[in-house]
């Protein structure tokens, strides 16, 4: 696949997507801006936690963009690879896989040096009732990684959940707002940020903290949760009445480009779409596409977990894929019974329980 100036989803292409490999290829275009960034970046790239929802497509996108830039870069991915077939699939894309439980000292220490790291490891779902492991994954492990790779350039995943709820009319939280995390997951994610900030200060490690809110693709995300409710004629919960989202290929490309923004002290960047979306409006849009009457439950609160992407827009540009394109794509995918990760986001949670 050659470089492209567009990352927008092509609805007509959906009909030809049947396998995981085809879908991941479609979700990993190498944009001209990313190709230029990968051409400027020096050295190999190691993705820690490559086995998560976004990891395979981010790694493949980085591989393609590096090849388009003519840079002989190794793209390495470390994970436990508990999903059958994932390691082999990544290897078929040209990604070098490293089987590793990152919480184990010896395997982590044995990982090869890499000038560039995208840190995607963490725990969210199942954190309620398993708080100790959540804090180990989200706070202890980042410290170990920072000690292992003090000279690397790091883009570390975080979340907009660390901000807490804000008025739906206020435009969303910005990077300079005081965090107000609710629940163990959000608190431990703020802890993760503080650990990366500490080691960035102490070791001079160039770091950028990615507060993501929320990535969307046909198999997973807030829009998929709402679409599946509408399609199956289940009530759509209005408890969290507003949200942000961003097309996953856009998010991956922006996060890879954000490696160039890494600094010491650590930079913080909201990675988010430009719109504040209303659950009721989105559900009704799916209802029109699917010719379904939409039912609702719960009451719409005046506050929600919302972020503002102004800093990102100024530094890297706005995501070009709007919500209408995402809704059209996901409606078509759900109606054709396309592949699903079967992992609800629980975005409607207002008490921080996941």
Image (cartoon, rainbow, N blue to C red):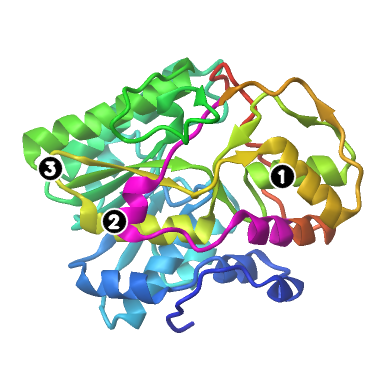
Check disc 1 and report its element: helix, strand or loop: helix
Percent from the top left, x then y, of residue 173? 41, 32
Among the 4 quarters of the image, the one containing residue 316: bottom left
Percent from the top left, x then y, of residue 210? 35, 43
Q: Nearer the viewer, mark 2 or mark 3?
A: 2
Residue carrying label 1: 282
Compared across the picture, whether 278 is left or right of 268 comes to: right
Residue drawn 70% across the image and 62% down it: 329
Gap between marks 2 and 1 measured at Cα? 29 Å
Answer whether residue 281 is visible to the viewer in this image: yes
Give the mark, 2 or 1, whose residue is nearer the N terminus.
1
> Which circle marks residue 301 in the picture?
none
Residue carrying label 2: 315
Gap between marks 3 and 1 measured at Cα? 40 Å
Residue carrying label 3: 264
Q: Which of 211 and 276 is in front in this view?
A: 276
């Amino acid at each position: 696949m050659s470089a492209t100036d567009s990352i927008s989803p092509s609805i007509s292409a959906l009909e030809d997507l049947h396998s995981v490999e085809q879908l991941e290829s479609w979700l990993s275009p190498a944009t001209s801006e990313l190709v230029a960034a990968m051409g400027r970046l020096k050295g190999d790239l190691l993705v820690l936690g490559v086995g998560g929802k976004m990891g395979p497509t981010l790694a493949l996108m980085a591989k393609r963009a590096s090849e388009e830039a003519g840079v002989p870069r190794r793209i390495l991915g470390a994970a436990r690879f508990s999903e059958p077939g994932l390691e082999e699939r990544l290897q078929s894309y040209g990604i070098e896989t490293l089987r590793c439980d990152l919480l184990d000292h010896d395997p982590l220490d044995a990982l090869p040096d890499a000038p560039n790291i995208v840190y995607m490891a963490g725990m969210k779902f199942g954190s309620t009732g398993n708080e100790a492991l959540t804090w180990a994954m989200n706070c202890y492990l980042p410290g170990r990684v920072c000690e292992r790779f003090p000279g690397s350039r790091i883009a570390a995943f975080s979340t907009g959940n660390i901000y807490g709820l804000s008025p739906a009319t206020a435009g969303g939280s910005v990077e300079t707002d005081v965090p107000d995390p609710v629940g163990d997951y959000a608190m431990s994610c703020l802890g993760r940020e503080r650990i990366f900030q500490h080691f960035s200060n102490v070791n001079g490690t160039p770091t950028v903290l990615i507060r993501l809110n929320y990535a969307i693709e046909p198999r997973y995300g807030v829009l998929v949760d709402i679409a599946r409710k509408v399609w199956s004629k289940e009530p759509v919960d209005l408890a969290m009445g507003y949200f942000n989202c961003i097309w996953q290929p856009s998010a991956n490309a922006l996060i890879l480009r954000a490696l160039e923004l890494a600094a010491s002290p650590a930079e913080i960047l909201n990675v988010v779409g430009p719109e504040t979306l209303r659950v009721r409006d989105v559900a009704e849009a799916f209802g029109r596409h699917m010719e379904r009457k939409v039912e609702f439950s719960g009451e719409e609160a005046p506050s929600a977990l919302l972020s503002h992407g102004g800093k990102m827009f100024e530094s890297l540009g706005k995501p070009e894929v709007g919500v209408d394109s995402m809704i059209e794509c996901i409606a078509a995918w759900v109606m054709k019974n396309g592949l699903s990760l079967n992992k609800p986001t629980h975005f409607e949670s207002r008490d921080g329980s996941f």
